[in-house]
Image (spheres, rainbow, N blue to C red):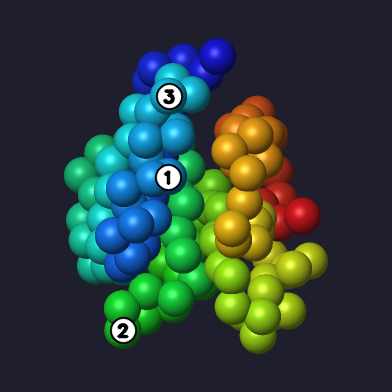
Amino acid sequence: MPAKFQHILVVDNNPDVLATVPGLLDELGYRVSTARSSSEARAVIKAGAVDLLISDEFLAGDLGRPLGVYARSIGVPVLLLSGHPASMELLVGGHFNFTSTPFQATDLDQTVSEILATPKGAANGR
């Protein structure tokens, strides 16, 4: 089980995702914050220690990749989510950790655990 101090920020403008993913992560023992936009997410990241950013690729008025670039620039690993075929083609094998949606809770658990176990200076994509 992860240490309670590991803080994950989940960013999505879809209320269903924000009602589900944070609950799954909380059950797995993580401390979870949420944001509905890139600007909200940046404020949370600036306000305190975030150990992992999980963001949808398509945010209201923005994309998850620029937010991911910002997070990585200050040492926060990133996991991007998307179920859109065009986005998936861009993200698979790219510069970010990526999981397609929908996903199984066990897959999310494994992916998050692997990312958090990776040393901070290591590459962030798979």
Q: Nearer the viewer, mark 3 or mark 2?
A: 3
Q: Amino acid at mark 2?
A: Gly
Q: Position of residue 18 (x, y in %)?
A: 33, 52
Mark toward the start of the polypeptide (1 vs 3): 1
Classify mark 2: residues with Cα within 10 Å, few (<14), some (14-19) or many (20+).
few
Q: Mark 1 highlights which residue?
A: 21
- Verify CB contact (< 8 Å) between mark 1 and mark 2: no
As measured in the structure, the alpha-carbon distance from the residue carrying label 3 to the one carrying label 2 is 31 Å
Mark toward the start of the polypeptide (3 vs 2): 3
Q: Secondary structure at mark 2?
A: loop
Q: Secondary structure at mark 1?
A: helix
Q: Amino acid at mark 1?
A: Val
Q: Nearer the viewer, residue 124 or 108?
A: 108
Q: Name the residue located 42 percent from the left edge and 24 percent from the top edge.
A: 27
Q: Nearer the viewer, mark 1 or mark 2?
A: 1
As measured in the structure, the alpha-carbon distance from the residue carrying label 1 to the one carrying label 3 is 10 Å
Q: Give the answer, above or below, for where 50 lies relative to 82.
A: above
Q: Name the residue located 74 percent from the left edge and 68 percent from the top edge.
A: 92
Q: Position of residue 68 (x, y in %)?
A: 49, 63
Q: Mark 2 highlights which residue?
A: 61
Q: Nearer the viewer, residue 73 or 103?
A: 103
Q: Nearer the viewer, residue 71 or 26?
A: 26
Q: Amino acid at mark 3?
A: Glu
Q: Is 61 placed left or right of 75 in the picture?
A: left
Q: Which mark is residue 27?
A: 3
Q: Which of the 4 image quarters holds residue 117?
A: top right
The answer to whether residue 50 of the structure is visible from this angle is: no
Classify mark 3: residues with Cα within 10 Å, few (<14), some (14-19) or many (20+).
few
Mark toward the start of the polypeptide (1 vs 2): 1
Q: Name the residue located 65 percent from the left edge and 34 percent from the top edge.
A: 106
